[in-house]
Structures are given as structure tokens and as C-alpha cells.
Image (spheres, grey):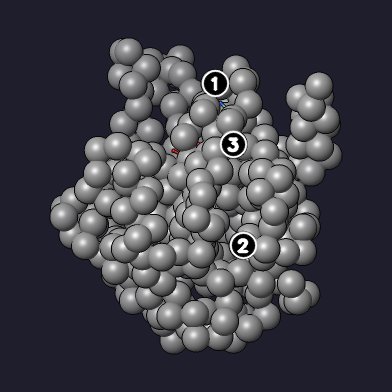
Amino acid sequence: MTKKQYDIAVLGELLIDFTPVGVSEKGNPIFERNPGGGPANMACAAARMGAKPYFIGKVGDDPFGRALKKTLEDQGVDAGGLLLDREAPTTLAFVHLDETGERSFSFYRRGGADTLLRPEEADAGILDRSRFFFCSSVMMAEGPSRETSFFLMREARRRGTPVVFDPNLRPNLWADGEEMRRIVRQALPLADFLKVSEEEAQFLAGEAETEAAAAALQKEFRPRLLLVTLGAEGVLAFAGKHPLRVPGFRVNAVDTTAAGDSFTGGFLAALLASGREPEDLAPEELRAVLRTANAVGALTASRKGSISALPDKEETGRFLAEREG
Ligand code: ADP
């Protein structure tokens, strides 16, 4: 693996998640301002695990956007590709909890800065200086950012920079589910490494059973590496002909927000540290990389929050050593 200036060029949404934290003296709900966005979580997880990510995106030139930029930088992510838009606001999402603790979201994204990144605003040259390019489907839901996502995916392929795609499906950000499926399936052939959850594999393949869904995705889209995450059960990987199942770690999961994102960040950091291509790793070596990714996901799930819940390299190393025996 040749060394590049950056390990991962990350394109993605960066937004504010307002999460409920109780009730004020006046009896009104109180919300806490949290950084949000799957690709941002992934970039921060990779940085904490020792990788060098570069972030591409757009936020509003407002206190929310500026705080988000600072969060990335504080976490060790180069925010050189993050634009601050004077006209458009930073996208907001509010989390609501009903009486049973069930979560629902209201998004304030129409015209949000993260949907407005135009292809000519993204520096495709960064792809030559990055070992991987990562993106998800949230930027494809609406606005010029859809075109920019496809533009950078194609540019990465043309320049020989492997594309890592995590669909990270969010149906309520799309006009309708059928459009989401159609657009995301257009992106799948551009993915060198494809990471999906079980539900996403089933939805995208149109198969009710996980192994059949994974086989169908492999056959149709031929990614070099397919990772199907199984929550607490770990991950199913297809790097060659034979699937590799790597069980997850038993932890007291209190909040699985960002578990999938941190899994991918941990995976890419561990793969980079191996210095090898996934298909060149022996099964035991790939297993070790995926064990690290599972550990990062499990540690993230064991704490509340997203970026604030991410483990670093030392903590992950200690966790793995403890679980070894
Ligand atoms: P997503 O968060 O994208 O829905 P998953 O729920 O499959 O994806 O979780 C991603 C990874 O995070 C899993 O493969 C696993 O390594 C880890 N993980 C998630 N939930 C748990 C859990 N409850 N216990 C241990 N590990 C977990």
C-alpha cells in the first residue's frame, strides 16, 4: 500500500443533532446540541484509531457550522474540504422520545447547506492524495450534493482510489423509498468496499434472508470487499469466494448510535495499519482487522452519544487484549 498525504477522503453530511436531555423548570423539554452525521462519525473514529482523514462537505456559516468544523479539527480530522455557506443554514435534526423511550426524528434539511455542495466546489485532486474515498447515501438524497457524490465516486474510480461506500439508509430524508432504492443501487457498482447492515443488505438486494441478500449483492455489484454488519453478532465479510464470520463482543450496549460508523472507521484504520489490500490478507489477518472493527463498534455502543462515545487506539488495544483470554 503506497503512503499518501491522507488516508481517507470523506464526503458527507455534517449536521446538528438536538437530543432530549430532560425538562426545564418551566416544564419544557431541553435539547442538547450534538455534532451529527454518519461520515463525520466515521472520520472521527478513524482519526482516533490513528488514521488521517480529510473531510469534504458543507455547513452554514453560522454558530452551528463553525462549532461542527471545530469538532472535526479537535478530533484530528483535516476539515480542509469543509465549506461554510453564507446563504444556507446548517442542517438540524431533533430527536424525540415517546413515553416508551422509542426515538423519532424531525429533520430541518430543506435547503440545508449539506445538500448544496456542488461538484465544482469539491477538489477532486484530493482523491489522488488519499488512500481511500468514503461516502454514504445521505448526501444523495437531494440537491447538488447528489451529483457531487456521484462525481467524486467516479473520479475516485478513474484515479484508482478505492471507493468505500456505506449506504447508511435514512428513508425519511428521501422523497420516497423507491427513489432511494433506485439511486442507491446506481451507486453500488461504484463501490470497491461496500459496508451494509443486515437490513440494508436485505432492502437493497430485495432478499429476506441475510446470506442470500449478501450473495445477491456480491453477484450483481461485485465489490472487492463486502461487509455486512450484524449488530451485537459482529460481521459477515466477503473478500474472496468464502464468507468470513467474525463474532461481535459482548458489552452492555446503552446507545448504538454511531456503532456502524465507528466500525467502518476502525476497520479502515486497522486495514491501513496492516499495509495490505483486503484480498491479499490471509483469513486470520482479515479476521484480526475485523475484530478490531468489532471492538471499536462495541465500545461505541457501550456509551451514550456518537463522537463523544468513540474509543481511541489505546483503549481499543486494551479491550482486545482483555478479551483475548
Ligand atoms: P448500524 O449501526 O450501521 O446499524 P450495526 O448495528 O450492525 O450497524 O453495528 C455495527 C457494528 O457495531 C457491529 O458489526 C458490531 O461490531 C458493533 N455493534 C453494534 N451493536 C453492538 C452491540 N449491541 N454489542 C456489541 N457490538 C455491537
Q: Which of 14 and 191 is in front in this view?
A: 191
The amino acid pointed to by label 1 is: Val
- Of residues 176 and 247, the one nearer the viewer is 247
Residue sitting at x 55%, y 38%: 245
Q: Is mark 3 on a helix, strand or loop?
A: strand
Query: Which residue position holds label 1?
Result: 254
* Residue 57 visible in the picture: no
- In percent of the image, x 79 and y 27: which residue is there? 324
**Measured Cα–Cα span from mark 2 to mark 3:** 16 Å
- Which quadrant holds residue 43? bottom right
Q: Which amino acid does label 2 sit on?
A: Glu
- Residue 35, relative to residue 251: is it above or below? below
Counting from the top left corner in percent of width and height, residue 44 is at: 65, 51
Q: What's the residue type where badge 3 is placed?
A: Val
- Per the image, the residue denoted by label 3 is 246
Quarter of the N terminus within the rendering: bottom right
Which labelled disc corresponds to residue 279? 2
